[in-house]
Image (cartoon, rainbow, N blue to C red):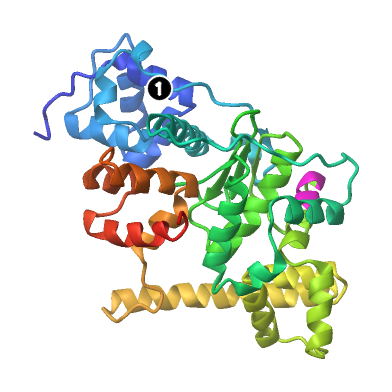
Protein backbone atom coordinates (compact mmCIF):
# COMPACT_ATOMS: atom_id res chain seq x y z
CA UNK A 1 0.00 0.00 0.00
CA UNK A 2 2.89 2.36 0.81
CA UNK A 3 3.95 2.47 -2.84
CA UNK A 4 0.49 2.69 -4.41
CA UNK A 5 0.13 5.86 -6.44
CA UNK A 6 -2.76 8.18 -5.57
CA UNK A 7 -4.42 9.21 -8.82
CA UNK A 8 -5.43 12.57 -7.40
CA UNK A 9 -6.42 15.61 -9.42
CA UNK A 10 -3.23 17.66 -9.39
CA UNK A 11 -5.06 20.77 -10.53
CA UNK A 12 -7.33 20.45 -7.49
CA UNK A 13 -4.40 20.12 -5.10
CA UNK A 14 -2.73 23.17 -6.63
CA UNK A 15 -6.01 25.13 -6.55
CA UNK A 16 -6.58 24.32 -2.88
CA UNK A 17 -3.09 25.48 -1.93
CA UNK A 18 -3.50 28.68 -3.95
CA UNK A 19 -6.95 29.54 -2.57
CA UNK A 20 -6.07 28.76 1.03
CA UNK A 21 -2.65 30.37 0.73
CA UNK A 22 -0.46 27.39 1.55
CA UNK A 23 3.13 27.26 0.32
CA UNK A 24 5.16 24.22 -0.77
CA UNK A 25 7.69 25.18 1.91
CA UNK A 26 5.06 24.81 4.64
CA UNK A 27 3.88 21.46 3.31
CA UNK A 28 7.49 20.28 3.19
CA UNK A 29 8.11 21.41 6.76
CA UNK A 30 4.98 19.64 8.05
CA UNK A 31 5.26 16.41 6.03
CA UNK A 32 9.00 15.85 5.94
CA UNK A 33 8.87 15.52 2.16
CA UNK A 34 11.22 17.69 0.14
CA UNK A 35 9.98 20.98 -1.23
CA UNK A 36 11.09 19.90 -4.71
CA UNK A 37 8.94 16.76 -4.49
CA UNK A 38 5.90 18.73 -3.36
CA UNK A 39 6.43 21.28 -6.13
CA UNK A 40 6.34 18.43 -8.65
CA UNK A 41 3.05 17.19 -7.18
CA UNK A 42 1.64 20.69 -7.60
CA UNK A 43 2.98 21.24 -11.12
CA UNK A 44 0.54 20.49 -13.98
CA UNK A 45 3.46 19.83 -16.34
CA UNK A 46 4.87 17.05 -14.14
CA UNK A 47 3.64 13.45 -14.18
CA UNK A 48 4.84 12.96 -10.59
CA UNK A 49 2.10 11.90 -8.14
CA UNK A 50 2.16 11.14 -4.39
CA UNK A 51 1.44 7.72 -2.98
CA UNK A 52 -1.84 7.16 -1.18
CA UNK A 53 -0.13 7.50 2.21
CA UNK A 54 1.60 10.71 1.11
CA UNK A 55 -1.63 12.16 -0.30
CA UNK A 56 -3.51 11.36 2.92
CA UNK A 57 -0.83 13.20 4.85
CA UNK A 58 -1.23 16.24 2.61
CA UNK A 59 -5.01 16.18 3.04
CA UNK A 60 -4.67 15.97 6.82
CA UNK A 61 -2.35 18.97 6.95
CA UNK A 62 -4.65 20.96 4.64
CA UNK A 63 -7.65 20.03 6.86
CA UNK A 64 -9.60 18.62 3.93
CA UNK A 65 -11.17 15.21 3.24
CA UNK A 66 -8.84 12.87 1.38
CA UNK A 67 -11.57 12.27 -1.23
CA UNK A 68 -11.51 15.98 -2.06
CA UNK A 69 -8.15 15.54 -3.79
CA UNK A 70 -9.84 13.38 -6.43
CA UNK A 71 -12.54 15.93 -7.26
CA UNK A 72 -12.42 18.71 -9.81
CA UNK A 73 -11.38 22.07 -8.43
CA UNK A 74 -14.65 23.73 -9.47
CA UNK A 75 -16.59 21.17 -7.41
CA UNK A 76 -14.99 22.38 -4.20
CA UNK A 77 -15.99 25.72 -2.72
CA UNK A 78 -13.32 26.95 -0.35
CA UNK A 79 -14.45 30.53 -0.56
CA UNK A 80 -11.89 33.28 -0.38
CA UNK A 81 -9.59 34.31 2.39
CA UNK A 82 -10.95 37.52 3.91
CA UNK A 83 -8.71 40.55 4.13
CA UNK A 84 -7.40 40.72 7.68
CA UNK A 85 -5.27 43.48 9.12
CA UNK A 86 -2.07 42.01 10.46
CA UNK A 87 -1.66 43.56 13.92
CA UNK A 88 0.79 40.96 15.13
CA UNK A 89 4.23 41.74 16.48
CA UNK A 90 6.62 39.19 15.00
CA UNK A 91 10.39 38.99 14.61
CA UNK A 92 11.45 38.96 10.94
CA UNK A 93 7.83 39.63 9.95
CA UNK A 94 8.79 39.92 6.29
CA UNK A 95 9.88 36.28 6.12
CA UNK A 96 6.95 34.74 8.03
CA UNK A 97 5.07 31.94 6.24
CA UNK A 98 1.42 32.30 7.24
CA UNK A 99 0.22 29.05 5.65
CA UNK A 100 -0.85 27.58 9.00
CA UNK A 101 -2.71 30.77 9.90
CA UNK A 102 -4.47 30.84 6.52
CA UNK A 103 -5.66 27.28 7.09
CA UNK A 104 -6.93 28.35 10.52
CA UNK A 105 -8.91 31.23 9.02
CA UNK A 106 -10.50 28.92 6.44
CA UNK A 107 -11.34 26.43 9.22
CA UNK A 108 -13.13 29.15 11.19
CA UNK A 109 -15.21 30.16 8.18
CA UNK A 110 -16.04 26.53 7.37
CA UNK A 111 -17.14 25.90 10.95
CA UNK A 112 -19.35 29.00 10.95
CA UNK A 113 -20.92 28.10 7.60
CA UNK A 114 -21.45 24.47 8.66
CA UNK A 115 -23.23 25.67 11.80
CA UNK A 116 -25.46 27.97 9.74
CA UNK A 117 -26.34 25.20 7.26
CA UNK A 118 -27.18 22.63 9.96
CA UNK A 119 -29.20 25.19 11.92
CA UNK A 120 -31.27 25.73 8.79
CA UNK A 121 -31.73 21.96 8.29
CA UNK A 122 -32.84 21.54 11.90
CA UNK A 123 -35.13 24.60 11.71
CA UNK A 124 -33.24 26.28 14.54
CA UNK A 125 -33.74 30.03 14.46
CA UNK A 126 -30.44 31.87 14.46
CA UNK A 127 -30.09 35.01 16.52
CA UNK A 128 -29.96 38.16 14.41
CA UNK A 129 -26.66 39.92 14.87
CA UNK A 130 -26.84 42.70 17.42
CA UNK A 131 -23.93 44.98 18.26
CA UNK A 132 -23.83 48.13 20.39
CA UNK A 133 -22.99 51.47 18.85
CA UNK A 134 -20.00 53.04 20.57
CA UNK A 135 -18.47 56.38 19.67
CA UNK A 136 -15.17 56.12 17.80
CA UNK A 137 -13.45 58.33 20.34
CA UNK A 138 -14.79 56.45 23.39
CA UNK A 139 -12.28 55.66 26.12
CA UNK A 140 -11.40 52.07 27.12
CA UNK A 141 -13.51 52.54 30.27
CA UNK A 142 -16.57 53.55 28.22
CA UNK A 143 -16.04 50.63 25.84
CA UNK A 144 -15.72 48.22 28.75
CA UNK A 145 -18.85 49.46 30.50
CA UNK A 146 -20.84 49.21 27.27
CA UNK A 147 -19.59 45.66 26.63
CA UNK A 148 -20.43 44.51 30.14
CA UNK A 149 -23.91 46.02 29.95
CA UNK A 150 -24.80 44.99 26.38
CA UNK A 151 -23.54 41.40 26.63
CA UNK A 152 -24.81 41.04 30.21
CA UNK A 153 -21.44 40.18 31.69
CA UNK A 154 -22.68 40.73 35.22
CA UNK A 155 -19.98 41.03 37.86
CA UNK A 156 -21.92 38.92 40.36
CA UNK A 157 -22.29 36.17 37.76
CA UNK A 158 -18.54 36.36 37.20
CA UNK A 159 -17.89 35.96 40.94
CA UNK A 160 -20.13 32.88 41.01
CA UNK A 161 -18.13 31.07 38.33
CA UNK A 162 -16.37 28.10 39.91
CA UNK A 163 -13.25 28.33 37.74
CA UNK A 164 -11.62 30.31 34.92
CA UNK A 165 -12.94 27.65 32.54
CA UNK A 166 -16.53 28.19 33.65
CA UNK A 167 -16.09 31.94 33.24
CA UNK A 168 -14.64 31.41 29.75
CA UNK A 169 -17.66 29.33 28.76
CA UNK A 170 -20.01 31.91 30.30
CA UNK A 171 -18.42 34.80 28.39
CA UNK A 172 -18.47 32.79 25.16
CA UNK A 173 -22.17 31.96 25.49
CA UNK A 174 -23.12 35.55 26.39
CA UNK A 175 -21.41 36.96 23.31
CA UNK A 176 -22.72 34.25 20.97
CA UNK A 177 -26.21 35.04 22.26
CA UNK A 178 -25.94 38.32 20.32
CA UNK A 179 -25.31 36.57 17.00
CA UNK A 180 -21.52 36.23 16.86
CA UNK A 181 -19.71 32.93 16.28
CA UNK A 182 -16.82 32.03 18.62
CA UNK A 183 -14.63 29.06 17.78
CA UNK A 184 -11.07 27.88 18.39
CA UNK A 185 -8.47 27.34 15.69
CA UNK A 186 -5.77 24.67 15.89
CA UNK A 187 -2.16 23.93 14.94
CA UNK A 188 -1.06 27.56 15.29
CA UNK A 189 1.65 28.43 17.86
CA UNK A 190 0.37 31.01 20.36
CA UNK A 191 3.28 33.29 19.54
CA UNK A 192 2.10 33.30 15.90
CA UNK A 193 -1.52 34.21 16.69
CA UNK A 194 -3.73 34.20 19.77
CA UNK A 195 -6.85 35.65 18.22
CA UNK A 196 -8.58 36.34 14.91
CA UNK A 197 -11.47 38.72 14.27
CA UNK A 198 -13.45 38.27 11.03
CA UNK A 199 -16.14 40.91 10.66
CA UNK A 200 -19.14 40.64 8.38
CA UNK A 201 -22.64 42.05 8.63
CA UNK A 202 -24.34 38.67 9.15
CA UNK A 203 -22.27 36.57 11.55
CA UNK A 204 -18.86 37.90 12.63
CA UNK A 205 -16.32 35.34 13.82
CA UNK A 206 -14.00 35.48 16.80
CA UNK A 207 -11.27 32.85 16.61
CA UNK A 208 -9.23 31.86 19.66
CA UNK A 209 -6.08 29.72 19.77
CA UNK A 210 -7.02 26.35 21.27
CA UNK A 211 -3.51 26.01 22.77
CA UNK A 212 -4.19 28.81 25.26
CA UNK A 213 -5.53 28.22 28.76
CA UNK A 214 -9.14 29.24 29.54
CA UNK A 215 -8.31 32.59 31.20
CA UNK A 216 -6.11 33.58 28.25
CA UNK A 217 -8.91 32.60 25.88
CA UNK A 218 -11.35 34.81 27.78
CA UNK A 219 -9.01 37.79 27.46
CA UNK A 220 -8.58 37.10 23.74
CA UNK A 221 -12.36 36.93 23.22
CA UNK A 222 -12.86 40.41 24.65
CA UNK A 223 -9.83 41.76 22.78
CA UNK A 224 -11.16 40.46 19.45
CA UNK A 225 -14.68 41.61 20.32
CA UNK A 226 -13.37 45.17 20.40
CA UNK A 227 -12.11 44.74 16.82
CA UNK A 228 -15.54 43.40 15.80
CA UNK A 229 -17.27 46.38 17.45
CA UNK A 230 -14.99 48.62 15.42
CA UNK A 231 -16.05 46.64 12.31
CA UNK A 232 -12.49 45.40 11.80
CA UNK A 233 -11.02 42.08 10.71
CA UNK A 234 -7.64 41.43 12.26
CA UNK A 235 -5.03 38.90 13.37
CA UNK A 236 -3.48 39.44 16.81
CA UNK A 237 -0.80 37.85 18.94
CA UNK A 238 0.35 40.48 21.43
CA UNK A 239 -1.88 40.49 24.51
CA UNK A 240 0.60 42.31 26.74
CA UNK A 241 0.27 45.68 28.35
CA UNK A 242 3.11 47.02 26.23
CA UNK A 243 2.22 46.09 22.67
CA UNK A 244 3.97 47.94 19.88
CA UNK A 245 0.62 48.52 18.16
CA UNK A 246 -1.48 51.34 19.63
CA UNK A 247 -4.68 49.68 18.42
CA UNK A 248 -3.69 46.53 20.27
CA UNK A 249 -2.90 48.56 23.39
CA UNK A 250 -6.45 49.94 23.24
CA UNK A 251 -8.04 46.50 22.81
CA UNK A 252 -5.96 45.13 25.67
CA UNK A 253 -6.97 48.03 27.90
CA UNK A 254 -10.66 47.41 27.16
CA UNK A 255 -10.30 43.68 27.82
CA UNK A 256 -8.56 44.32 31.11
CA UNK A 257 -11.26 46.74 32.27
CA UNK A 258 -14.05 44.36 31.22
CA UNK A 259 -12.56 41.40 33.08
CA UNK A 260 -11.35 43.30 36.14
CA UNK A 261 -13.09 46.68 36.42
CA UNK A 262 -10.97 49.25 38.21
CA UNK A 263 -13.83 50.05 40.59
CA UNK A 264 -14.27 46.38 41.49
CA UNK A 265 -10.54 45.97 42.06
CA UNK A 266 -10.52 49.03 44.31
CA UNK A 267 -13.49 47.68 46.26
CA UNK A 268 -11.71 44.37 46.74
CA UNK A 269 -8.61 46.06 48.17
CA UNK A 270 -10.74 48.14 50.53
CA UNK A 271 -12.88 45.20 51.69
CA UNK A 272 -9.81 43.09 52.47
CA UNK A 273 -7.67 45.97 53.74
CA UNK A 274 -4.98 44.74 51.34
CA UNK A 275 -1.74 46.70 51.41
CA UNK A 276 1.06 44.21 50.75
CA UNK A 277 0.85 42.39 47.41
CA UNK A 278 2.36 38.92 47.05
CA UNK A 279 2.02 36.00 44.66
CA UNK A 280 -0.47 34.47 47.08
CA UNK A 281 -2.66 37.58 47.17
CA UNK A 282 -2.46 37.83 43.38
CA UNK A 283 -3.72 34.25 43.12
CA UNK A 284 -6.56 35.01 45.54
CA UNK A 285 -7.67 38.01 43.49
CA UNK A 286 -7.40 36.00 40.26
CA UNK A 287 -9.59 33.28 41.76
CA UNK A 288 -12.14 35.91 42.79
CA UNK A 289 -12.46 37.22 39.24
CA UNK A 290 -11.95 33.80 37.59
CA UNK A 291 -9.19 35.07 35.37
CA UNK A 292 -5.43 34.56 35.16
CA UNK A 293 -2.82 35.85 37.55
CA UNK A 294 -1.16 37.51 34.56
CA UNK A 295 -4.24 39.68 33.99
CA UNK A 296 -4.33 40.66 37.66
CA UNK A 297 -0.67 41.69 37.53
CA UNK A 298 -1.41 43.74 34.44
CA UNK A 299 -4.44 45.38 36.08
CA UNK A 300 -2.43 46.22 39.17
CA UNK A 301 -0.01 48.02 36.90
CA UNK A 302 -2.81 49.69 34.89
CA UNK A 303 -4.42 51.00 38.09
CA UNK A 304 -1.10 52.36 39.40
CA UNK A 305 -0.69 49.83 42.22
CA UNK A 306 2.52 48.57 40.60
CA UNK A 307 5.56 50.28 39.18
CA UNK A 308 6.95 48.99 35.89
CA UNK A 309 9.77 47.22 37.75
CA UNK A 310 7.28 45.53 40.09
CA UNK A 311 5.19 44.48 37.12
CA UNK A 312 8.22 42.94 35.42
CA UNK A 313 9.23 41.10 38.59
CA UNK A 314 5.83 39.52 39.18
CA UNK A 315 5.30 38.76 35.49
CA UNK A 316 8.64 36.93 35.34
CA UNK A 317 7.84 34.97 38.51
CA UNK A 318 4.47 33.91 37.10
CA UNK A 319 6.07 32.82 33.83
CA UNK A 320 8.63 30.77 35.73
CA UNK A 321 5.85 29.19 37.80
CA UNK A 322 3.88 28.29 34.67
CA UNK A 323 6.92 26.71 33.02
CA UNK A 324 7.66 24.71 36.19
CA UNK A 325 4.09 23.35 36.21
CA UNK A 326 4.40 22.36 32.57
CA UNK A 327 7.73 20.63 33.19
CA UNK A 328 6.30 18.75 36.20
CA UNK A 329 3.49 17.49 34.00
CA UNK A 330 5.95 16.22 31.39
CA UNK A 331 8.05 14.44 34.03
CA UNK A 332 4.97 12.81 35.59
CA UNK A 333 3.91 11.48 32.20
CA UNK A 334 7.41 10.23 31.38
CA UNK A 335 7.66 8.39 34.71
CA UNK A 336 4.19 6.89 34.42
CA UNK A 337 2.90 8.74 37.49
CA UNK A 338 -0.51 10.36 37.84
CA UNK A 339 -0.35 13.67 36.01
CA UNK A 340 -1.91 16.45 38.16
CA UNK A 341 -2.70 18.26 34.90
CA UNK A 342 -4.12 15.24 33.08
CA UNK A 343 -6.07 16.11 29.97
CA UNK A 344 -9.84 15.85 29.94
CA UNK A 345 -10.69 15.13 26.31
CA UNK A 346 -14.40 15.93 26.61
CA UNK A 347 -13.73 19.30 28.19
CA UNK A 348 -11.08 20.10 25.61
CA UNK A 349 -13.54 19.31 22.81
CA UNK A 350 -16.21 21.56 24.34
CA UNK A 351 -13.74 24.35 25.06
CA UNK A 352 -12.48 24.50 21.47
CA UNK A 353 -15.92 24.17 19.86
CA UNK A 354 -18.32 27.08 19.54
CA UNK A 355 -21.16 26.96 22.06
CA UNK A 356 -23.55 27.38 19.13
CA UNK A 357 -21.91 24.42 17.37
CA UNK A 358 -22.10 22.32 20.55
CA UNK A 359 -25.81 23.10 20.72
CA UNK A 360 -26.60 21.96 17.17
CA UNK A 361 -24.48 18.82 17.62
CA UNK A 362 -26.45 17.96 20.74
CA UNK A 363 -29.85 18.72 19.17
CA UNK A 364 -28.93 17.02 15.91
CA UNK A 365 -27.73 13.95 17.77
CA UNK A 366 -30.97 13.81 19.75
CA UNK A 367 -33.05 14.06 16.58
CA UNK A 368 -31.03 11.47 14.66
CA UNK A 369 -29.55 14.04 12.26
CA UNK A 370 -26.09 13.13 13.55
CA UNK A 371 -24.91 9.66 14.56
CA UNK A 372 -22.60 9.12 17.50
CA UNK A 373 -19.84 8.56 14.96
CA UNK A 374 -20.65 11.92 13.32
CA UNK A 375 -20.47 13.78 16.63
CA UNK A 376 -17.26 11.96 17.54
CA UNK A 377 -15.64 12.98 14.25
CA UNK A 378 -16.81 16.58 14.38
CA UNK A 379 -15.59 17.03 17.96
CA UNK A 380 -12.40 15.04 17.46
CA UNK A 381 -13.00 12.73 20.44
CA UNK A 382 -13.72 9.03 20.84
CA UNK A 383 -17.31 7.84 20.92
CA UNK A 384 -16.95 6.79 24.56
CA UNK A 385 -16.70 10.49 25.49
CA UNK A 386 -20.01 11.50 23.85
CA UNK A 387 -22.19 10.85 26.96
CA UNK A 388 -20.09 13.32 28.97
CA UNK A 389 -20.42 15.84 26.15
CA UNK A 390 -24.21 15.42 26.17
CA UNK A 391 -24.36 15.82 29.95
CA UNK A 392 -22.43 19.09 30.05
CA UNK A 393 -23.94 20.79 27.02
CA UNK A 394 -27.48 19.81 28.08
CA UNK A 395 -27.08 22.13 31.08
CA UNK A 396 -26.71 25.16 28.78
CA UNK A 397 -29.92 24.79 26.82
CA UNK A 398 -32.51 23.80 29.39
Q: Is residue 320 above or below residue 397?
A: below
Drawn side of residue 266 relative to residue 344, left or right: right
Identify the residue at image location x=74%, y=67%.
260
Please name the predominant secondary structure of the magenta segment in the image: helix
Q: Is residue 370 left or right of residue 327?
A: left
**Residue corresponding to mark 1:** 16
Q: Quadrant of the C terminus?
A: bottom left
Is any part of residue 239 visible from this angle? yes
Q: Residue 114's image quarter?
A: top left
Q: Residues within 10 Å of mark 1 (few under 14, many from 20)?
A: many
Q: Which residues are magenta?
A: 246-251
Quadrant of the drawing holding the N terminus? top left
Q: Residue furthest right?
A: 137
Q: How many marks?
A: 1
Reply above or below: 330 against 89. Answer: below
At horizontal 46% and vertical 54% (from top left) the residue drawn is 397
Where residue 303 appears, as percent x and y from the top left, is 85, 70
Tell me residue 335's x, y (percent).
28, 79
Residue nearer the viewer, 236 or 363: 363
Asked whether 87 or 359 is in front, the reply is 359
Name the residue furthest left: 1
Give the image location of residue 374, x and y in percent: 26, 42
Amino acid sequence: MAGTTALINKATLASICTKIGVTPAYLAQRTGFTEDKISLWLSPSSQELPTIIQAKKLAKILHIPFAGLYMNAEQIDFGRLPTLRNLRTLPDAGSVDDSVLNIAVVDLIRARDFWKAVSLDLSIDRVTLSLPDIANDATPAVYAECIRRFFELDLNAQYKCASPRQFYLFVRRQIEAKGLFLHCFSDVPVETARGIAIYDEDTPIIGVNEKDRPPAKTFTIIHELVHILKRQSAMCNDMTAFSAQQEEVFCNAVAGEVLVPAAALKAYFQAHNLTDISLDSIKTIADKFSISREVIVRRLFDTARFSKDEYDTFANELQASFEAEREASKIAQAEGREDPYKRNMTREAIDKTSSSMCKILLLGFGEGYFTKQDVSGLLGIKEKHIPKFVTEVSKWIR
